[in-house]
Image (cartoon, rainbow, N blue to C red):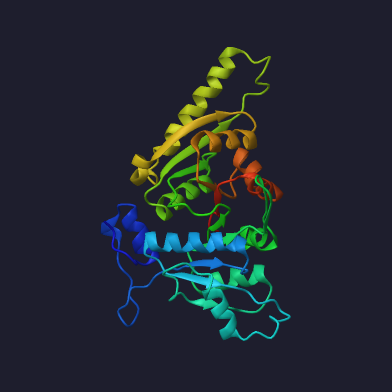
Amino acid sequence: MCPRRLGRKCGLACRAGQVSDCEVEFDRSGAEMTSPILVATDLSARSDRAVDRAFELGRDLGLVVEVVHVRKDEGHDGVSDVALQQRVREILPPGGAAADVLVPEGSPPGTIARIAKERGAQLIVAGVARFNQISDYFLGTAIDYLLRHAEVPVLVVKQRPRGLYRRILVPSDFSPASKQAILTAARLIPDAAIRVVHVFHIGFESWGVADHVREETLARAQSGLAEFLASDDLAPFAGRIEGVLASGEAEAAVGRAIEDYDADLVVLGTQGGGALRQLTGGSRANSLLAWIRPDTLMVRLPG
């Protein structure tokens, strides 16, 4: 078992089975360094879900959770920082009393991203702005900005936490971005099963395609998926990962895969190519996030 409260480099290496490569980092006082989880709240009932999920992840991983509530530039009705911090503490779950509560002033989107960088956060957790109906989530400008500019993964929480994540679905086009998504999910959620779905397309599937073309396309997809999952990077997690194929239009195929697997977390790697680029590029990412019911982790490829 990996020790709790390891630094990011050491903790992730240990969870990947690379214990020999794991060197605990210490500050000058000898205390272990950690990379916190940063959760954003606007004090609404909707953001309670994100706060609860962040603290659940923190407990499971042995990580510090820090809470940020951004005061708008025009102030907060004369409320002092101390009073506002106390107001934030009142919504924290049991065990959250010792958490650092930050109440910076500024534009929420940019300020959250800046605070995450300054605090060395390894994950940003945020809730949706509102629920229009059961299958329609409005992300809001803060999440839209974070998805484009944050340097660390962003977990968009939609559902009320009912235990740890158990079934993770990751769409993959075999790109470095989708591999990074799988690795991030495997390390952040160490006890969950992961299903990797690759969507392939066979022209006009309903008519006019010869059987041998279908068979060749399917064979290429099967071979590509097997080779991708056999890579050295994914080998430490092989026992938790299964691959499946889905045919058709990317968005619809992913939707069916989510339902079939009863996934409670969907992980998307941005900057992919092919079908993944169609799903996660620009406004399409917002569209996808707007109707996916499970919580969604967005992972940007570094660089």
Tell how many labels. Answer: 0
Which residue lies at the image location 34% right of the left edge and 40% below the top edge?
239
Q: Nearer the viewer, residue 183 or 167?
A: 167
Which residue lies at the image location 36% right of the left edge and 45% below the top edge?
237
Q: Nearer the viewer, residue 238 or 129?
A: 129
Residue 129 at least partly seen: yes
Which residue lies at the image location 35% right of the left edge and 78% below the top edge?
27
Residue 115 percent across, percent down from the top left: 56, 73
Residue 119 percent across, percent down from the top left: 50, 73
Please identify the quadrant where the N terminus is shown: bottom left
Q: Residue furthest right?
A: 74
Q: Nearer the viewer, residue 142 or 279?
A: 142
Image-quadrant location for residue 103: bottom right
Residue 102 percent across, percent down from the top left: 55, 77
Please identify the quadrant where the C terminus is shown: bottom right
Residue 150 at least partly seen: no
Q: Nearer the viewer, residue 103 or 24?
A: 103
Query: Eyeballing the image, is 102 above or below 264?
Result: below
Image-quadrant location for residue 22: bottom left
Query: Eyeballing the image, is 275 above or below 128?
Result: above
Query: Eyeballing the image, is 137 above or below 242?
Result: below
Residue 217 percent across, percent down from the top left: 55, 23
